[in-house]
Image (cartoon, rainbow, N blue to C red):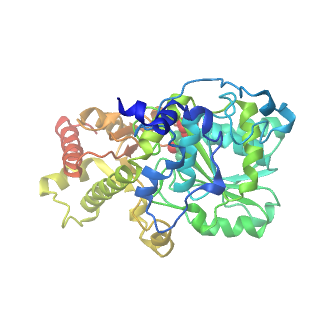
Amino acid sequence: MSPAATNGAHQARVDDDDAGKAPPAADFDALDLDPNISLATHALHADTSLNLQTDVAPSIHVATTFRYDKDPNNLRPFQTRSPAGLSPNEYCYSRYSAPNSTRLETILSVLLKNPCLTYSSGLSALHALFTFLNPKKVAIGDGYHGSHGVLDLHIRLTGCTKLPLDCKPEDLNEGDLICLETPVNPTGKAFNIAHYAAIAHSRGAYLCVDSTFAPPPLQDPFKHGADIVMHSGTKYIGGHSDLLCGVLAVKNKSWIPGMFKDRSCLGSVMGSLEGWLGVRSLRTLELRVTRQSENAGRLVDALDGALTGHTVGTGLSLSDVEAITSVVASVTHASLQADDMSWLRKQMPQGYGPVFSITMKSAELAKRLPSKLKYFDHATSLGGVESLIEWRTMTDPSVEETVLRVSVGVEDARDLLDDLVGACGALVEEGVK
Ligand SMILES: *Cc1c(COP(=O)(O)O)cnc(C)c1O
């Protein structure tokens, strides 16, 4: 007799489709938020309650629609279901929710320690936030140019006002929003979250932190007063340059049903395959991000050390230093913010973001350096396991033409440094000015 035939319970479990049984939205009351369990462990096990099949790797569910209960006694009209017409025990239509994305949201909610919803992209998450809160004023600083694009669109529809990040606190009122991106694009410079939280809360306004450049375990903006944490999950959460994703996590759990309803109408849900890829990616989030942060620290140390005469321990030779100083004007990264360490060490205790920027001595040098590199692809975006470099003016009109943005991957740091130094030397040899 086969094991399956003797084990009825096992057979029934295998026949159960977890699409039909798992809750359609992450159940935030049932999440395992045990603070004694580390992030690395949660990333592997926070979704255990959703395992209704025996597969160790979750199944891929691509269905857009799900069969209703066979028993007519269990059928209820739309108005009597919640939230947004759904009972907690059924999937209905994938514009509302779908199993792969629910699994992703379940894990993310544990890692971010607050309930979260996923969206089709980082910008659609930001759009969802503006739509849900409908602030009259938004204070926002430099940062990702697309975020300004979303706000401009919201302004066009609502007449909301844009204020500078460091506006007078009196200019903000109840329900308004401060949008802080930290560390900020494209330089990787960090801002003091607690400072902006205090200003927002003194006026009854909210603080949203775009923490894309410092995913867990690097930074927990909620710990320092953020009301909302946003991620472009396309970057470190996806981590393999192969999926678009946006994330909103919120301190106020009562916002979730309304946000869920908005998302159901806007249709800005992730694709199911992307949701599955996102789960696969989260399993290694801590490994990847820790390595990327360490690598970036070593590269920044060496490049900045060459410029400032602090080369002990960097492994650079005299000729390496000469190659770097001939073409590089400056390096920017949170690790170099010596005057900010009193708050920065508290807010980023595990290390700084894996993105930094290099300002070259001329636009021509910045344009030509990427083509000299072997291990950094010249491309936009960031957060993947592969190192990228971008002559930032290719996509961002607000940035000087001398700026290169570097997104450090999981390669060996020494190989990456040798590659960068070799590229600087090649520019010197060619006489590029
Ligand atoms: C990429 C990015 C976004 C936009 O995210 P998408 O997923 O591309 O829509 C927003 N903020 C920051 C800081 C980003 O790097």
The answer to whether residue 144 of the structure is visible from this angle is no
Q: Up-down: is 399 above or below 112? A: above
The answer to whether residue 222 of the structure is visible from this angle is yes
Q: Up-down: is 425 above or below 368? A: below
Q: Quadrant of residue 240?
A: top left
User: Could you tell me residue 177's position as x and y percent?
Assistant: 73, 55
User: Could you tell me residue 353's position as x and y percent?
Assistant: 42, 55
Q: How many marks?
A: 0
Report the residue that reaches farthest toward the bottom: 342
Q: Nearer the viewer, residue 28 or 182?
A: 28
Q: Quadrant of residue 96?
A: top right
Q: Nearer the viewer, residue 94 or 401?
A: 94
Residue under the point 68% across and 35% down? 90
User: Could you tell me residue 301's position as x and y percent?
Assistant: 29, 60
Q: Nearer the viewer, residue 34 or 247?
A: 34
Q: Quadrant of ligand 1?
A: top right
Residue under the point 45% across and 72% down? 341
User: Could you tell me residue 143's position as x and y percent?
Assistant: 56, 48
Tell me: 65 left or right of 53.
right
